[in-house]
DNA sequence: AGTATCCTGGAA
DNA sequence: TTCCAGGATACT
């Protein structure tokens, strides 16, 4: 579930909570959830926390030259949670303990998520370069979208989910943005008009901003760093509203599948 | 471009 | 008991 707004919420909360702390212990309860040797990060301090697409990057002190750093890369995938000062439950996969005895719990019901150690800035940069532009960046312009859309016959919904083309949009916010822009999710990307592209770009930025303001969407497993739910699910425009009335035109919202993913739209006002 | 797959648990 | 789920990738 965690998409850009959910991961950004955690990034901001981690930044003001764990920066400066020293890792004293790493407990791996499920091998698959931690890639690399957990002993390698013991004794290291958290320098800063950043986000790229749906990934968290925690910068750590290195152990050789002062200018070398290590990085912890975290992908929450569908059901990952990062909770600070909680206690373990049956879905806890990794516990990171700091020297002040406070703890960060990585819970992940479906075990698709992971934590990974990256040892060089170069490797981190390479990882970051695999993603398309961030929606809040200058690069994410109508011109850029027009260019990538023109090259594909895929449905617009699938293009929005493609992390190599655009960073951070997942199943929830793609449905939300397409509804706001009045575009049918099945429409071929290359067939969008300039006006539709402009509207879609603005809609994407607006729904992601609203998501961040709401602390993310917690209709299911997502939680903020303190364990509390996000609130965006209370503001869903179309997502999970199948069978209900469209908020714009009162028509009934439909649910279909695109690329195997549940997709919600209004047949009347999304063309 | 479409489907299976990694896992677990809740809903149907 | 079967079906389905917010991500991403490896297949055909």
Image (spheres, coloured by chain):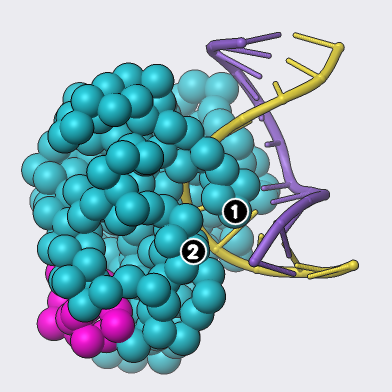
Chain colours: A cyan, B purple, C yellow
Position above or below: A267 against A163: above
Q: Residue at x 60, y 65 (%)?
A: A36
- Location of residue A165 (image quadrant): bottom left
Picture coordinates of residue A146, whole percent (x, y):
30, 83
Q: Is residue A140 magenta?
A: yes
Q: Chain of mark 1?
A: A
* Of the pair A136 and A159, the residue shown nearer to us: A159
Query: Is residue A215 shown to the viewer in this render?
Result: yes
Position above or below: A27 against A109: below
- Location of residue A195 (image quadrant): bottom left
Q: Residue at x 21, y 77 (%)?
A: A194
Verify CB contact (< 8 Å) between mark 2 and mark 1: yes
Q: Is residue A109 magenta?
A: no
- The answer to whether marks 2 and 1 sit on the same chain is yes
- Location of residue A190 (image quadrant): bottom left
Question: What kind of element bears circle 1?
Answer: loop
**Magenta highlight range:** A134-146
Total marks shown come to: 2
Please name the residue that numbered disc 2 is placed on. A155
User: Considering the image in quadrants, where does the N terminus of chain A appear?
Assistant: top left
Question: What kind of element bears circle 2?
Answer: loop
């Amino acid at each position: 579930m965690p998409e850009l707004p959910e991961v950004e919420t955690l990034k901001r909360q981690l930044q003001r909570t764990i920066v400066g702390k020293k890792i004293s212990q790493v407990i791996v309860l499920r091998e698959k959830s931690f890639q690399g040797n957990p002993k390698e990060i013991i004794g290291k301090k958290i320098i800063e926390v950043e986000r790229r697409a749906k990934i968290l990057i925690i910068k750590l002190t290195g152990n050789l030259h002062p200018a070398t750093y290590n990085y912890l890369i975290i992908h929450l995938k569908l059901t990952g949670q990062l909770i600070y000062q909680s206690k373990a439950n049956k879905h806890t996969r990794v516990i990171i303990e700091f020297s002040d005895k406070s703890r960060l719990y990585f819970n992940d019901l479906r075990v698709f998520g992971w934590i990974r150690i990256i040892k060089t800035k170069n490797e981190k940069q390479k990882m970051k370069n695999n993603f398309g532009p961030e929606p809040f960046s200058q690069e994410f312009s109508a011109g850029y979208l027009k260019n990538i859309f023109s090259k594909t016959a895929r449905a617009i919904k699938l293009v929005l989910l493609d992390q190599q083309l655009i960073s951070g949009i997942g199943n929830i916010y793609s449905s939300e943005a397409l509804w706001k822009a009045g575009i049918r999710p099945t429409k071929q990307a290359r067939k969008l008009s300039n006006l539709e592209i402009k509207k879609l770009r603005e809609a994407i930025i607006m729904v992601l901003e609203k998501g961040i303001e709401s602390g993310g969407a917690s209709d299911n497993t997502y939680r903020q760093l303190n364990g509390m739910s996000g609130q965006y699910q209370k503001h869903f425009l179309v997502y999970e509203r199948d069978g209900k009335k469209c908020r714009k035109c009162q028509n009934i919202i439909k649910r279909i599948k695109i690329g195997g993913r549940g997709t919600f739209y209004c047949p009347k006002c999304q063309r």
